[in-house]
Amino acid sequence: MSSKLLRLRTARQRHFLPPPLLQLVPVLLLLPPSRPASAAAATAVTHLPGFDGPLPFNLETGYVGVEEETGAELFYYFVESERSPGTDPLLLWLTGGPRCSIIMGLAFEIGPLKFVLAPYSGGLPELVYNPYSWTKMANILLLDSPVGSGFSFARDPKGYYVGDYSSSSQVQTFLNKWFTDHPQYLSNPFYIGGDSYAGKVIPLIAQGISEDIWLLSGLLLDEQQHD
């Protein structure tokens, strides 16, 4: 985390996808991997296949380069709080596996979408709004980490050989760049949470943030492997 960004924040705050899900890939994977790994890019998503009408919440997807040598980039979904995005907490959410897709968090756990449970008929699965989404009171940043999870990738195969420590370092790099591109959230209370195997990595991320004197409001650990 750069010292400039840290000072700014401190001053302001004082698996595998089942076949139906694979049909969402062309829309969810919106940004081609054809730019320098150091760059960050984002796209606002207003419609999704299987969802009737425009999305009733603000969804952004994008890639952030986290390792220049291997061209590693992490993919994210960012859902703005439906209540007060300028003051509500910002939650970084990771999932387990390791290398399960974070779409699990978006559509099966805490996100604003859910699938209509019905026998698969060969068409698009139906998506509906989840009225119990955590985005009712928080901004949620869902991250495909480590490299190889979901849509996150590396141009050099060596980039896929990451462990808990190296992946936690990449998440810190991701956060530094993401907050640089989204400075309006620097003053929001910041939390890190996740499930399953993410419990091994979340404490490492938190430790790295604390060593950089970056203010962290808390951790959310659900059925974690955090021994």
Image: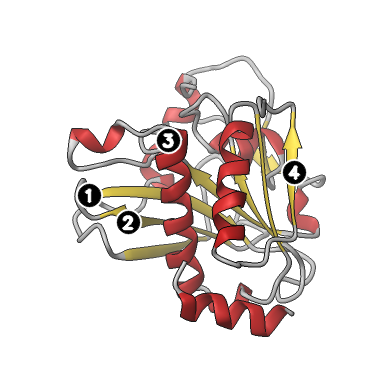
Reading the image, the residue beneath label 2 is 65
Q: Amino acid at mark 3?
A: Gly
Q: Amino acid at mark 2?
A: Gly
Residue 222: x, y in percent? 75, 32
* Residues marked 2 and 3 touching at CB (< 8 Å): no
Reading the image, the residue beneath label 4 is 220
Q: Residue at x 43, y 46 (%)?
A: 28
Instruction: Name the secondary structure under disc 1.
Output: loop
Q: Amino acid at mark 4?
A: Leu
Upstream in the sequence, badge 1 or badge 2? 2
Residue 150 is tagged as 3
* Residues marked 2 and 4 touching at CB (< 8 Å): no
* Residues marked 3 and 4 touching at CB (< 8 Å): no
Label 2 to label 3, Cα distance in Å? 15 Å
Q: How many marks?
A: 4
Taking depth in this image into account, of 131 and 194 the one nearest to the observer is 194
Instruction: Locate residue 149 relative to residue 194 in the image: left or right.
Output: left
Taking depth in this image into account, of 94 and 173 the one nearest to the observer is 173
Instruction: Name the secondary structure under disc 3.
Output: loop
